[in-house]
Image (cartoon, rainbow, N blue to C red):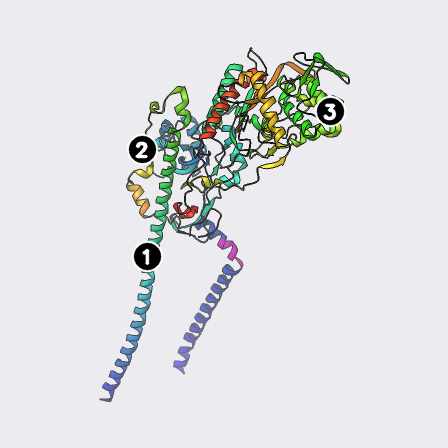
Amino acid sequence: MRLSGSHLPGRWRASGITVLMLLGWLAMIGRLIHVQGTQHASMYTRVDRQSTFTETLRARPGEIVDRNGHVLAMTVTRNSIFAVPSRIEDPRQFAWQAASVTGVDADQLLDRIRKSSDKHFIWIRRRVPNEIAEEFRSLGLPDRTWGFRREYLRQYPQGAIAGHVLGMRNIDNEGHGGLEESLNDHIRGEDGRRVMTRDALGVVVEVEASESRTPVHGRSVVTTIDLLAQLTIERQLDDIMERWEPVGACAIVMEPHTGEVLAMASRPGFDPNKPAEVGDDAWRNLAVSAVFEPGSTFKPFVVGWAMQHNTLNQADVIQCFNGAYRMGGRILHDHHSYASLSVEDVLVKSSNIGMARIAERIGLQSLYECTVAFGFGRRTGIELPGELSGLVRQRAAWDEYSLGSVPMGQELAVTPLQLIVAHAALANGGHLVRPHLLLASADRMAPTPLSAVETVDATAPVESTILHRRIADWIVQHPMKEVVERGTGRSARTDGLSIFGKTGTAQKVDETNGGYSNSRHICSFVCGAPAEDPEVLVLVMVDEPTAPGGHYGGTVAAPSAAKILADSLHRVRRLDHSVTIRPEEDLPIRLR
Amino acid sequence: MRFRLADILVTRFGGIMFFRFAAALMLVVAVSMAQVGLEKQSLRLRRQVSRQYYQMDELLELHAQLRLDIQKLSAPSQYVADGRHPGDVEERRPLRSTAEKPLDRRSRCSASSLPLLRWERPVRPDGAQR
């Protein structure tokens, strides 16, 4: 009994301890269920936040190349230098040393470091040249107080050439202006990401492959631009700017049968490599965004339309009333007095009265239809942002006054691109084509290891047929050729070339009285060659030449247009249309 | 005699159990070691693949830089400017790329302990996996 009595407290103790342990276990199990069950999401988020981080893998933007493979825009990698202010012990020394190499202002850098002394990251200078990066590395600044990050830098190896066609790409890989903007979705690619797990010391121990994604690099695009033709028009525009001191100027070279734009330039221009130096006016691509009255360059369309609808014949003679013709409530005048002119001479002499008389034959409705049929009043659809549709008033707004104004290129406004597209319809036998800057078939170009080549849908270039071929050919080979031979475009005559063309001189609106200004003009000249089978079409438009010596299209624009035409014709005939197709197997696997 | 026999039986029985226990333990250890070995091999291969991707990226960057230099040097504007002939264009030394230089000690360290940058399957530009 004593024994059992002495064992009794021990048993109670054992039972008590067992119960306590059980309770302890139960409490732990309960807590476990609580943590794993109800608090699972928040705990998981905390762990995830502390141990994993996501890094964005930037996609390399694709290249833009000309039709012969010259690179117009491409991307390289540069080092960006950053500092870790929280680890910098001597900010003054750090700032002074860093500034001596990077060229940033030492005081400003010191100020930024001090203001961010509790932060772990500030940029010192982004996308520095390799030499500066090496020099910075050799400074021997304390470890873990600075570092490099690699970032893409868009480069335009041809400098300012074709700046308006290309546009720019900013530091965030967004295109602004030109093809960079309109083809942004193709060129920019798709960023990837890398999800990594790190330990308590911050060292990466694992990459979560299932959650990571490889970047899809941007695709390269092949343009219809011919670099040498582009270079020619850039130089001619520079000459025009120097000689005539205009507000602006632009030029376009086009293949009239396909609508391929071989060259396009605008002034003032800019160098996309130096975005900080671009002037406010320089952004504007006048080739697609300048809206002006076409003046006499519009006249051939009305003549062709009248012939198409059998209201005018090549052999007709038009009464011109010796230079003054009353039309409704106003009197029209010609620069020179003519009693009568043949249809051909109406265009060669650029007679306003003759055109008004032709317009009277076709009537207001048909004149409106002519304007619309040649593509005025709507965008051409070229792959450039900021294209304007020009200005063609609603039919209801046209009156008898329009019958005299529209045939001489007034009362409507067009863009240079619309004008050259309409003239392309005359040059190619009467078909309105869609101008484009991308080669319809990119398989002519070898892809680079940096990116695959974008294949563009081969949309039919011909939109509609406007004129019979014989009418279009007659206008090009007779009146427009004679314009250069003996008319207002004589300064475009070039030995050995059969050039056709049409000059245009339009008065700008005088903002003080709402009428036409007598001192501010827009001069244009559109020409092509050879007249028998046009291969190239050139348009030069000069906005408000201010230098003394003339303000006519034949004086200001025609000589440069002729030079561009001669060079472009030379280029077109040398274009290599047999570029070897590079097999896909040559590409790195991830780019196929 | 009976007692010695029992001892022998117990000893023998215990020996068998011990043998079984030891064998099971060794099996577990062996499987674990094999797993660790395979994990290490997998990690090494991943690092190799990752390093190759890294090297390919470096080569692509070098290619891009050289391509840019070539394009700048052969830009038609250089030849046409001021009436110069192509032979008159001054030569520029191509920029050295960091990829050309041997890795310094710190870089070597970081290369050997290179984080696993990428080993997932290549992706086509249109997003499809190969």
Quadrant assignment, res A258: top right
In the rendered image, residue A61, in percent from the top left (x then y), is placed at: 46, 39
Q: Which residue is mark 1?
A: B41
In the image, what residue type sits under mark 1? Gln
Q: Earlier in the sequence, mark 2 or mark 3?
A: 2
In the image, what residue type sits under mark 2? Ser
| Mark carried by residue A361 | 3
Task: Say whether marks 2 and 1 touch (CB < 8 Å).
Answer: no
Q: Give the number of the mark in front: 2 or 1.
A: 1
- Give the distance between the C-alpha atoms of the residues marked 2 and 3, in whole angstroms: 82 Å
- Give the distance between the C-alpha atoms of the residues marked 2 and 1, in whole angstroms: 37 Å
**Looking at the image, can residue A166 be seen?**
yes
Q: Which residue is mark 2?
A: A138
**Mark 2, other Cα within 10 Å: few <14 / some 14–19 / many ≥20:** few
Label 1 chain ID: B
Residue numbers of the magenta segment = A38-44
Label 3 chain ID: A
Task: Say whether marks 1 and 3 touch (CB < 8 Å).
Answer: no
In the rendered image, residue A371, in percent from the top left (x then y), is placed at: 67, 29
- Callout 3 secondary element: helix
| Direction from residue A169 to residue B116 in the image, left or right | left
- Residue located farthest toward the top when viewing the structure as drawn: A548
Q: Give the number of the mark in front: 1 or 3.
A: 3
